[in-house]
Image: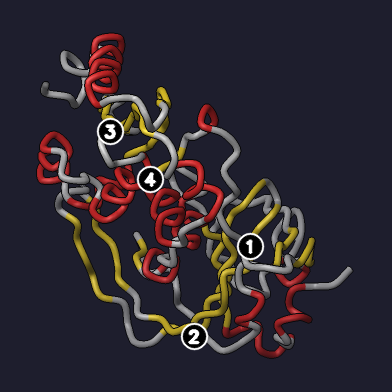
């Protein structure tokens, strides 16, 4: 079985220079993977609750599934971490500066690594020998993709259930199957706040299809809706990462604006988003 360290050409004598980062989210284990998909993994990794990177290099592995990790690259730690604070999120930690090392960068997002991690520590030394289970040095290659990992193709309007990070990837990468589907329908959509459960019902009508409307949300999280502008103003712009998007109803492009507005009002009444959600009108 091919070992990851053999592919990365890290010798036994060099292991003392590496920390392994098994990157998972606290509340959402897939958060670092979502950050990776939108090109923000490096920045996400550089913000740490504690001074976790005490060695010159970080071998980054991103959680994908049970015992399965994606190779996220090797990073060099440059300088000492500085303390930071996010008042809106009640968070304090440390900000690192790192540089991506030119080591098998063509395999970032392509190598799936098998490693059964049976301890809680997320930042082990590469040469660590745990009391139980596999040593980090024995991580093996599960598979290698032909192309870098990306968002799945569109599979149906009734299956849409995406968060803000995923929406950004879909719009920024202009994924053909998603654009084709969302560019040819008007409709009613739902935005849900994962923290509070509050919901916002919106619609795309006139010359706006769902793709165009959601492109506006991808830019700033609020798309110009006064209720969402207020939400992000109150909680900080990063609060947009707590929003999820789905589609309640699709409508033929030939249907008039009045019909779609009527259906939007139906869903607002049905879900009581005026009384208990994020809609004001």
Judging by the rendered image, the residue that carries numbered circle 4 is 211
Mark 3 or mark 1, whichever is nearer to me = 3
Mark on residue 56?
2
Disc on the earlier residue, 2 or 1: 2
Q: Quadrant of the C terminus?
A: top left
Mark on residue 203?
none
Q: Is disc 1 placed on a helix, strand or loop?
A: strand
User: Separation of disc 2 and disc 4 at Cα?
Assistant: 44 Å
In the rendered image, residue 24, in percent from the top left (x then y), is placed at 51, 53
In the rendered image, residue 211, in percent from the top left (x then y), is placed at 38, 45
What residue appears at the point 52 percent right and 48 percent down from the top-left corner?
30
Disc on the earlier residue, 1 or 4: 1
Mark 2 or mark 3, whichever is nearer to me = 3
In the rendered image, residue 267, in percent from the top left (x then y), is placed at 30, 15
Mark 2 or mark 4, whichever is nearer to me = 4
Mark 2 or mark 1, whichever is nearer to me = 1
CB-based contact (under 8 Å), mark 2 and mark 4: no
Give the side of residue 199 with respect to residue 184, left or right: left
Judging by the rendered image, the residue that carries numbered circle 3 is 205
Q: Is disc 3 placed on a helix, strand or loop?
A: loop
CB-based contact (under 8 Å), mark 1 and mark 4: no
Where 108 sits versus 189, above or below?
below
Q: How many residues crowd around disc 4 within 10 Å: few (fewer than 14), some, or many (20 or more)?
A: many
Q: Is disc 4 placed on a helix, strand or loop?
A: helix
User: Separation of disc 3 and disc 1 at Cα?
Assistant: 40 Å
Judging by the rendered image, the residue that carries numbered circle 1 is 70
Q: How many residues crowd around disc 1 within 10 Å: few (fewer than 14), some, or many (20 or more)?
A: many
């Amino acid at each position: 079985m091919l070992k990851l360290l053999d592919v990365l050409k890290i010798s036994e004598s060099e292991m003392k220079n590496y920390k392994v980062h098994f990157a998972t989210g606290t509340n959402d284990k897939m958060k670092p993977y979502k950050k990776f998909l939108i090109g923000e993994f490096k920045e996400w990794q550089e913000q740490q609750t504690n001074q976790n990177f005490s060695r010159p290099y970080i071998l980054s592995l991103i959680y994908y599934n049970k015992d399965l990790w994606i190779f996220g690259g090797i990073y060099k730690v440059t300088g000492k971490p500085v303390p930071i604070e996010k008042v809106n999120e009640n968070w304090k930690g440390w900000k690192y500066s790192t540089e991506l090392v030119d080591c098998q960068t063509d395999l970032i997002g392509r190598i799936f690594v098998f490693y059964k991690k049976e301890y809680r520590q997320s930042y082990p030394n590469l040469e660590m020998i745990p009391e139980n289970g596999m040593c980090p040095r024995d991580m093996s290659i599960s598979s290698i993709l032909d192309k870098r990992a990306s968002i799945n193709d569109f599979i149906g309007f009734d299956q849409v259930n995406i968060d803000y990070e995923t929406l950004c990837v879909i719009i920024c990468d202009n994924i053909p199957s998603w654009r084709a589907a969302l560019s040819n329908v008007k409709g009613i959509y739902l935005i849900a706040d994962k923290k509070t459960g509050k919901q916002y019902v919106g619609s795309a009508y006139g010359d706006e299809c769902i793709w165009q409307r959601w492109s506006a949300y991808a830019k700033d999280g609020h798309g110009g809706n006064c209720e969402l502008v207020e939400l992000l103003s109150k909680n900080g712009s990063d609060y947009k990462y707590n929003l999820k998007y789905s589609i309640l109803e699709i409508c033929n492009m030939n249907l008039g604006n009045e019909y779609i507005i009527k259906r939007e009002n139906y869903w607002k009444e049905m879900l009581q988003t005026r009384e208990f959600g994020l809609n004001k009108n």
